[in-house]
Amino acid sequence: MDDNVLFISAYNSDHYKMQNWILRNIRQLFPSSREKNIHSLLKKYHLSFVASDGFLTSVDEKIKIETHYDYMHQKTTFSFNPKSTNNGKDAMFSLKGSGFYINLQHAQSVLIDDQYFKIQFIVWLSPFLVWINDRMYQIDSGAFMMNHVWFTIFEIIDYKTGKTLTKDDACSKVKNYNLLPVEKYQFFDEQQPVDTDLKISEIIYNTISGFTWELTNKRFRSEGYSFVHNTVVFSNHIENISDYFCKLINIKAPVSSVKDISTVETYEYYPQDGCSVISHFDSNEFNTVLYPVIILETLKL
């Protein structure tokens, strides 16, 4: 994958402090006698899985995940223990879709100290469709809560061509998909699309907020929030990074100096306010670049 665009937003709710405490204690909230509740909520809100406190829960399965860190060699190993009695059939289904959780946890363990930057909650949404300017796109998205802030992450696939957006598809305000309103959206298991004027990140955030609201027995719900958007372009085909930044965010000159701050040889990392460019990476090892960049970008936000 030589060319891809990732959109990241940070949402800080005005009324989430108490709810965060509850989310960190999800096992106490939902003991085994009430597990059907969380499974039905995942289905209702189109969530493939939710992970917290060492447990990954999908619509059909709950799995305990033990994480082992080798800080000397910067390796992370995971062991999985299905908590149901279905002979692991659904567990294998859940594990196939758990890459977002596993890769994100590994990147966190390598790059940051979880005593100061703690990921409390990880969610992966089912794919959904959006219509923008009469064109249809598929959205693949996830989110995680770190230090009481929700970070939504999504990539956009042109539904007609089946290809993800490239560096030239996200330039200028008219192509800033962080800001463009959606005309309607539809999850694949729904019969009809929903009319809306929300942005893509707002659809993701509102979906998660609805889930956590019901998860806490409708006791806590966000009524206001602050947010910031960010665009990350992965491309090995940008000749002049400074010129591309000007084109990307429609400015005459970059706000700050453009320089590679990567400390590894596997990619070059050029951050700016509101956007970043990643270049000179091995497209065959894209995940080894993608998830460290996600962690670094959330720290920037």
Image (cartoon, rainbow, N blue to C red):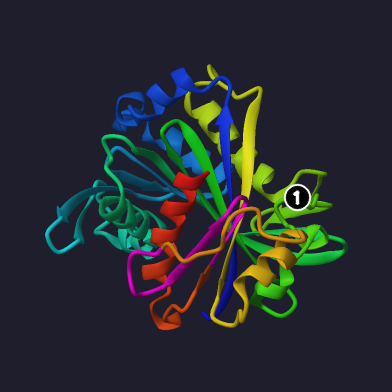
Counting from the top left corner in percent of width and height, residue 229 is at 64, 47
**Is 268 part of what is drawn in magenta?**
yes
Q: Is residue 262 left or right of residue 75?
A: right
Instruction: Reply above or below: 28 against 66.
Output: above
The residue depicted at 58 percent of the width and 57 percent of the height is 154
Q: Amino acid at mark 1?
A: Leu
Front one among 142 and 119: 119
Assign a secondary structure to mark 1: loop
* Residue 198 position in % (x across, y down): 77, 43
* Quarter of image, res 86: bottom left
Q: Residue at x 57, y 48 (%)?
A: 46
x, y percent for residue 94: 37, 58
Region in magenta: 262-277
Name above or below for residue 227 compared with residue 101. above
Residue under the image location 46 percent in, 79 percent down = 280
Horizontally, is 265 left or right of 183 in the view? left
In the picture of the structure, the residue carrying the numbered disc 1 is 179
> Measured from the top left, where is residue 3 in percent x and y?
58, 77
Is residue 165 among the parts visible in the rendering? no
Instruction: Tell me if 231 is positioned left or right of 252 in this view.
Output: left
